[in-house]
Amino acid sequence: MIKDNPKSFFGYSDVTVILNSIYSKSNIDTYLYQIRNLIGSNREEQIFNFVETFINEKNNIYNFEYKWIQNKKMEGIVIGGNIRCFLKLVGTKFIPTFKNKILFLESLSGNAARIKSYLTQYKNMGVFNEVNGVILGTFKEMEINKYNLTVEELVLDIINNENLPIVKTKNIGHGNDSKCLVLGKKIILES
């Protein structure tokens, strides 16, 4: 029914499950974005970027800054979202294929041990052998508490593949200044 009646679906965090399921089963792009940011403390900028993107057909809400963790180019269709919630699709018919995709991961909560556990599950599933790259969003608890290990260090240690492109952005996550990623859309990042 959704495939025959495509609409714009927006959501974030726990809604990662629904957004990726819709994309996986209908091939419809979905929007990893917190609509509530339009009424939050950063509303003026958010409304401006939203209108410029969805009314005036510009890319304001999609443009995000990133730093390279390793390599200098990645290209593929974006999937993913909240690191924990995306794993809820494992073993179901709703999980998208990882082959040649760009995996986006972020988290609101989770200390280093929990994030390491989630990343290890992705590795054991073979995800990091299939994707064309990884985009790391914000990992709020780890970043606020400044744990001894950073998410970048955890990812590099667990993935252990210097050929896999990885970037980190502070512009996509649970913050009220967060930008939008389109799941199901091809993205090219290069230095």
Image: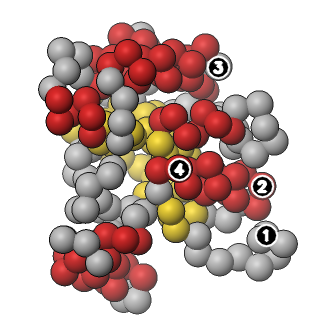
Q: Amino acid at mark 3?
A: Met
Q: Earlier in the sequence, mark 3 or mark 2?
A: 2
Q: Which residue is mark 1?
A: 3
188 vs 14, nearest the viewer? 14
Residue in view at x 58 percent, y 75 percent: 8
Q: Residue furthest bottom?
A: 55
Give residue 54's quadrant in the image. bottom left
Q: Earlier in the sequence, mark 4 or mark 2?
A: 4
Q: Position of residue 53 (x, y in %)?
A: 37, 79
Q: Which residue is mark 3?
A: 125
Secondary structure beneath dot 1 equals loop
Q: Amino acid at mark 1?
A: Lys
Is 39 situated left or right of 133 in this image?
left
- Of badges 3 and 4, the one in the foreground is 4
Q: Earlier in the sequence, mark 1 or mark 4?
A: 1
Q: Amino acid at mark 2?
A: Lys
Q: Amino acid at mark 4?
A: Asp
Distance from disc 1 to disc 4, alpha carbons, whole Å, reads: 22 Å
Distance from disc 3 to disc 1, alpha carbons, whole Å, reads: 28 Å
> Counting other residues with Cα less than 10 Å from the Cα at mark 2, is it few (<14), some (14-19), or many (20 or more)?
some
Residue in view at x 58 percent, y 70 percent: 9
Q: Is residue 162 visible?
A: no
Residue in view at x 37 percent, y 29 percent: 110
Q: Position of residue 30 (x, y in %)?
A: 57, 63
In which quadrant will I find the C terminus?
top left
Residue 166's place in the image compared with 11, above or below, is above
Q: Which residue is mark 4?
A: 14
Residue in view at x 68 percent, y 38 percent: 89
